[in-house]
Amino acid sequence: PEELRSLVDIQKGYLLRTDDIQTSVKRLYSLGRFSSVSVFAKRRQGTVLLTFQLTPLQHIEQISFSGLDHVNHKELVKALPVSQNDEFNSKTLPETEAQLLKHLHRVGYPDATVQALRSPGKSYNRVRIRVEIEENAPARIHTISFQGAARLSPEHLSGFIQSRDGGILNKQALAQDH
């Protein structure tokens, strides 16, 4: 498009300078419409053919989950490092997987697996993220016991904590019990 061509201050037939290429790349980035701007040069009969490769910014249109049976959906959404309309980039999927795995381990699912997948959205600059989760068996609390010279019975003390015998070992709840 002519709008973009006007930002590239390199004229056909003139001496090619690295500074001109860098200035053109900065101008294209300054539009805020591209996640990457690359320049490729190819020698052709004593001249150089420049190709500017522009990757448009993409934003997250939707985030969905599959495979959830026991994990709280709202808490999982809070654990996401991104949300709808955020910019999508090369780090989005691996960061999403890492943060959700960390959350799942914290709430008692140490063997959970997470795979974040990208698919096209309704327009060229929109993407959808689908997160496939396999919870697997949770870590469970076998027994809770109280030690020391307690003035209250174990049954009474149990009323003050969230964790329960046979319950899922939720590290967040355990920290509040402490």
Image (cartoon, rainbow, N blue to C red):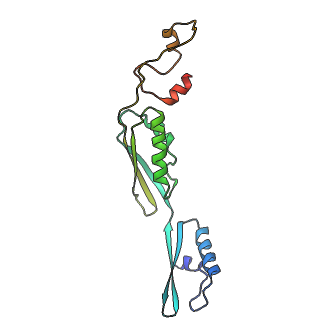
Is there any visible trace of residue 156 in the rendered image? yes
* Residue 32 percent coordinates (x, y): 58, 65
Q: Tell whether 133 sits left or right of 78.
A: left
Circle count: 0
At 58% from the left edge and 72% from the top edge, which residue is drawn? 28
| Location of residue 62 with respect to 162 vertically, above or below | below
| 127 vs 94, nearest the viewer | 94
At 50% from the left edge and 71% from the top edge, which residue is drawn? 54
| Location of residue 104 with respect to 93 vertically, above or below | above
| 152 vs 4, nearest the viewer | 152
* Residue 143 percent coordinates (x, y): 43, 18
Quarter of the figure with residue 152? top right
| Location of residue 97 with respect to 28 vertically, above or below | above
Is there any visible trace of residue 74 in the rendered image? no
* Residue 100 percent coordinates (x, y): 46, 42
At 43% from the left edge and 50% from the top edge, which residue is drawn? 62
Q: Tell whether 32 sits left or right of 112.
A: right
At 53% from the left edge and 16% from the top edge, which residue is drawn? 160
In the picture, the quarter occupied by the C terminus is: top right
| Location of residue 98 with respect to 70 vertically, above or below | below
* Residue 86 percent coordinates (x, y): 52, 53
